[in-house]
């Protein structure tokens, strides 16, 4: 969440402005605006007695200019708020990646330690087996020697 001290915060105005800016880019808004403009022009072109905005439709142009004067800052506000959310999400993702990397490094270190211990045990076992073989051969040689002397 953006901090409480950010330029736009989580206030109701910011949320409504962002919602309005998002609506400006929808097909429904564009289609609705197109229908209104067609009706406006048609009524002002055809209805002689009801011409509240005759050609060149200065009132319509004023309405569009006013809407644009408000729409542009609202869109910028929405983009700024989205950038803040994207940055926060990116920061969280980076922190998660760092945690995963640290956990993987710890796991690798643990596996290396266990592998080294297993290698040491295997080496010790090999040495003991060799000593056992040597002692067995010596016992066998001594047994043969004793048996040869006795017989």
Image (cartoon, rainbow, N blue to C red):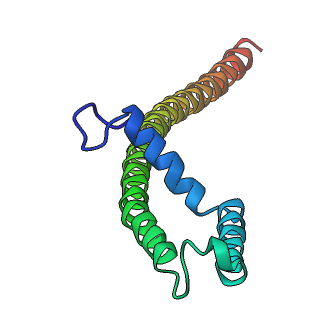
15 relative to 135, above or below: below
82 relative to 141, above or below: below
What residue is shown at x 71% (from left), y 79% (from top)?
42
Q: Is residue 93 visible?
A: no
The front one of 137 and 16 is 16
The front one of 93 and 132 is 93
What residue is shown at x 27% (from left), y 31% (from top)?
4
Drawn side of residue 79 relative to residue 26, left or right: left
The front one of 106 and 2 is 2
How far across and down, in percent of the image, does residue 112 sit? Answer: 48, 38
Q: Is residue 127 visible?
A: yes
Residue at the bottom extreme, as displayed = 56
Drawn side of residue 64 relative to residue 142, left or right: left
Q: Quadrant of the N terminus?
A: top left
7 relative to 57, above or below: above
Q: Quadrant of residue 98?
A: top left
The front one of 89 and 35 is 35
Q: Quadrant of the C terminus?
A: top right
What residue is shown at x 30% (from left), y 42% (from top)?
8
Drawn side of residue 55 relative to residue 46, left or right: left
Residue at the top extreme, as displayed = 150
């Amino acid at each position: 969440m953006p901090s409480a001290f950010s330029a736009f915060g989580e206030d109701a105005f910011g949320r409504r402005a962002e919602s309005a800016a998002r609506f400006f880019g929808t097909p429904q808004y564009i289609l609705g605006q197109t229908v209104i403009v067609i009706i406006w022009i048609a009524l002002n072109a055809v209805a002689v007695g009801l011409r509240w905005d005759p050609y060149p439709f200065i009132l319509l142009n004023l309405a569009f200019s006013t809407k644009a004067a408000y729409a542009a800052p609202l869109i910028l506000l929405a983009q700024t708020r989205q950038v803040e959310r994207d940055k926060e999400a990116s920061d969280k993702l980076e922190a998660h990646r760092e945690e995963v990397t640290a956990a993987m490094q710890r796991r690798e270190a643990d596996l290396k330690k266990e592998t080294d211990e297993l290698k040491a045990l295997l080496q010790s076992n090999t040495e003991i087996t060799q000593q056992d073989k040597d002692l067995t051969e010596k016992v066998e040689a001594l047994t043969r020697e004793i048996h040869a002397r006795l017989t």
